[in-house]
Image (spheres, rainbow, N blue to C red):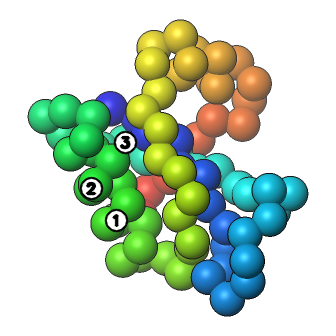
């Protein structure tokens, strides 16, 4: 399952919408909740990012993300 993670690059400042960035992670999980938990844990362990939101991408949403040219799965 592909998850889209919205994050701020630092935990030292208050989040600002203008500074929100995204990354995509491929997580193997039995359901959406387990995938979100694994994604958050992975990002928090491997980076200093402040995770705002994690979203499971549907097939249509994934196709749209690929069409925009910004889609790239991040390896952590």
Q: Residue 35, percent across and down? A: 27, 44
Where's the C terminus, which quadrant?
A: bottom left
Q: Secondary structure at mark 3?
A: strand
Cα separation, mark 1 vs mark 3, equals 11 Å
Asked whether the beta carbons under mark 2 and mark 1 sit within 8 Å of each other, the answer is: yes
Q: Is residue 37 left or right of residue 63?
A: left
For disc 2, the neighbor class at 10 Å (few under 14, some 14 to 19, many from 20) is some
For the view shown, which residue lies furthest in the bottom direction?
A: 12
Q: Read off the residue under disc 3.
A: 26
Question: Residue 65, relative to residue 63: is it above or below?
Answer: below
Q: Residue 71, percent across and down? A: 63, 35
Q: Is residue 1 left or right of residue 6?
A: left
> Foreground mark, 1 or 3?
1
Query: How many numbered marks does the figure carry?
Result: 3
Q: Read off the residue under disc 2.
A: 38
Name the residue rendered at 37%, 42% in the picture: 26
Q: Residue 38, percent across and down? A: 27, 56
Q: Residue 53, percent across and down? A: 53, 51
For disc 1, the neighbor class at 10 Å (few under 14, some 14 to 19, many from 20) is some
Q: Secondary structure at mark 1?
A: helix
Residue 73 seen from this side: no
Name the residue rendered at 74%, 29% in the picture: 69
Q: Is residue 47 left or right of residue 13?
A: left
Q: Is residue 46 left or right of residue 67?
A: left
Q: Read off the residue under disc 1.
A: 42
For disc 3, the neighbor class at 10 Å (few under 14, some 14 to 19, many from 20) is some
For the view shown, which residue lies furthest in the front direction?
A: 14
């Amino acid at each position: 399952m592909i998850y889209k993670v919205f994050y701020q690059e630092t935990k030292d400042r208050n989040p600002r919408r203008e500074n929100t960035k995204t990354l995509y992670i491929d997580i193997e999980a039995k359901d959406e909740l387990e995938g979100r938990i694994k994604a958050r844990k992975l990002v928090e362990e491997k980076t200093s990012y402040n995770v705002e939101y994690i979203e499971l991408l549907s097939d249509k949403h994934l196709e749209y993300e690929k069409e925009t040219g910004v889609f790239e799965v991040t390896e952590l």
